[in-house]
Structure formats: C-alpha cells, structure tokens
Amino acid sequence: MRVSKLSFIAIVFFLSHNLFGQEKVRIGLFANKELQELEFLIDQGSAVLQSDTKSVILSQGTKITFKNNGAMVSAHADTIHFNSKKISLQAANIETVFQIQFSAKTRKLKYGEQLEFRVVNNKLEIVNIMPLDTYIAGVVEAEGGPNHELEYYKSQAVISRTYLLSQFYKHIDDGYNLCDQTHCQAFNGLPKHEHIMTNAAEQTKSLVIVDENANLITSAFHSNCGGRTNSSEYVWTRALPYCRETVDTFCIKMPNSNWEKRIPVNDWKNYLAKKRLSSSDSANYAYFPGEKEVYYREGETRVPVIDMRKDLKLKSTYFSAYQEGEEMVLVGQGFGHGVGLCQEGAIRQAQLGVNFEDIIHFYYYNVKIIPYQYIAFFKFE
Ligand SMILES: [Zn+2]
Ligand SMILES: [Zn+2]
C-alpha cells in the first residue's frame, strides 16, 4: 500500500505538533551547583506544595526549605513536613512568584509556574516547568542584556526558540530539556524587564530559523564581531552554509568593538617559543595582520588564532600586537567567536529601525523564518 505524500505530511505534522504542541518546557535550574539544601520564598501569590500522597496550600511570605534526605527529598515550611521521591511547588495564582537568594551578595532570582524537586546522584535537582514563551522571555534577557530595542529582543527570541527546539532532548536523560547554564542558554528565571521581554517572545510566537532544507539552524551568536563576522569553519571545523563571513559596519562603535590587553614581553616571547613561532634573531615581536587572519604566521610556522585566543584569554581572534617598553600591547576588535549574529550589530540595527526579520537575514545567509509547526510542511513541499 502506498502512503500518499499528503498523508505522510499530515503524520509528520501531527508528530511535530504533538512533540512541541503542549508548549511546556522543563529547564534544569542551578545546574552548575551541587545543592544539598535550598530555600524558596513565596514572594507573591500563593502556591500548592505537593508530593505523591499529599498537598497543602501555602500563602505569600512562606519560606520552604528543600533538602537532600537520602534517596528522598524533604520539604519544611512552618509546621509542614513532606518527605517524598518527588515534591512540586506549583503557582496557585497567575501572579505567584517564587524567589531564591543564595547569599546576601547575590541577586534575588524569581521563578514562576512550577518547580519540581528530586534527589538525583545524591544532590538536589530542581526543574522549572513553564510555558515555552515564559522560558524564551527569560533567556532573551539573560542572553540579550537589558535596555535595548524591541526588534533586537525579537531577533534574540527567535534565535533562542530555534536553539531550544533544535536541542530539545539535550538533557532528556537528566529529566529536563535544557539546563540554565550558558552551554545550553543562560536562564535566570523571570525577566526583570518583564514587559519588553514577554512582548519579544509573544510577538515572535512559534517563529524559528530554518535553512534551505527546512532544518533548524545552529543559531550561533556572539557579542561583537569587530566589523566582520566569521564563517563557521574558521572557528569550528563544520562549515554551516548560513554562517558566512559578512562585513558588519553596525557594530564598530559599540561598547565591545575594541579591546586592549597588555602582556609582559617575556610572557609573549615564551608563548611564541612554545608554539615554535619565535626565530632567534627576531628583535621585534610586533604583529600586524591587517586583514582578519585565521592563522598567526611567522615564516613557515602558523598557529590558529582561535588557539591564541583561548591560551591568552583574549576577547577575540581579531588583533594586532606591538611592543611598548617591557610590555606587549595587544589591540583587538570584537568580543566572542564572531560566528552568526553579532549582538551589538543587531542592537545598532534595531536602534536604526531595522526589523527583526531583516536583522536575522543580515547575519544568517539564505534562511527562512517560519512557525515551527510548519517545518514538516516545508520539508516535504
Ligand atoms: Zn545544559
Ligand atoms: Zn558585528
């Protein structure tokens, strides 16, 4: 029996719709910490504390302590004591906000919707379960920074949603989709500038970036490209057809467009020697590549500048160097790997009135911005 193309599209559409159709995401919180105990405050509204066997409503101002109690997790609040394999704290009103502060010096973090607590590998695991766009709004602020234009935040929202859906099962063995660390996407809970971040997520609802084969793209971005973005293969080995070198004049007068780092001349000499770059008669250690170079060259020897960036902890690979007394002065442009969207270029474009679609098309070559529910349709079209 032959399955018609149309019904095949319908099946794939149904699957992809169901996969994400619930529109809830599970985000692992504080994934970089080995937590044994922590305290949440019900900062606004009321909440339901629930285990497998019982539940109780807690009012605003209640503090709840969660602890690793062997294989179980325990929760204490006033006279209440829960001990269970899994405990959840769920918002009972639309305005409910949970707050946590790890120390007097760190900022208060706020979370909404539902928190789930378990003990995994002898430490507390906390998962925040929330609507997809609540998560996107939080990521847009954490990754995009405060006080910019809406169209810039909208470009960040589409990028973050593309990343989320392309990596939807990254932490599935841990019991969640993504964690809150930068190796996934930074997420510090509910955004402080809630109105604009929520607008950015809602006004781009469902939109993701796909390549010409309708695959979600690797939506790389960085702080400042220094005037020219990098093709992906200069930084990683993989050539992504949509991450091509692009001249970007929008970012050249922005906060991260220039940097300077001073290194003792001896450290610089030793570093070059280690990399077999210094010839014995070299009296001058200056380096002026002119154009953006992939390698630092000296005679027949060459070292990838991405290695130098890592070794010397430089803000970018785009730099020149000269000697001044006992110091080498490294003068560079840009901040970050330079692949994909340049945030400060995008910020500037948004200030000049460019919309988020045009910003995305400027930094990613030959892509489409479509609702993720239509991916299957475009694939088999
Ligand atoms: Zn992660
Ligand atoms: Zn740039």
Image (cartoon, rainbow, N blue to C red):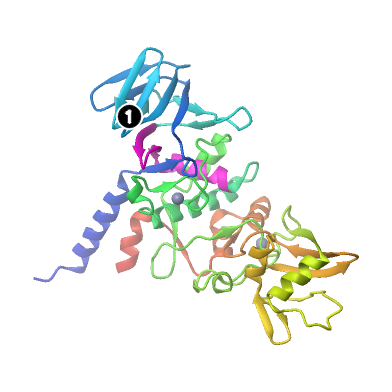
Ligand 2 - quadrant of the structure image: bottom right
The boundaries of the magenta stretch are: 114-143
Residue 48 image offset from top left, x and y in percent: 34, 22
Residue 279: % across, % down = 78, 82
The spot of residue 207 in percent (x, y) is 44, 53
Between residues 164 and 249, which one lies in front from this camera angle? 164
Which amino acid is tagged 1? Ile
Is residue 160 visible in the rendered structure shown here? yes
According to the picture, the residue beneath numbered tag 1 turns out to be: 87
Residue 79, position as x, y percentages in the image: 37, 12
Q: Please report the residue visible at 71 percent of the width from the left and 68 percent of the height from the top.
A: 318
Which element carries disc 1, helix, strand or loop? strand
Instruction: From this view, report whether residue 316 is shown above or below residue 160.
Output: below
Q: Residue furthest bottom?
A: 300
Q: Residues within 10 Å of mark 1 (few under 14, many from 20)?
A: many
Q: Is 117 one of the magenta-colored residues?
A: yes
**Residue at 30% across, 32% down:** 86
Residue located 65% across and 52% down the image: 347
Between residue 50 and residue 299, name the one nearer to us.
299
Q: Residue furthest right?
A: 325
Classify residue 296 as left or right of residue 159.
right
* Quarter that holds the C terminus: bottom left
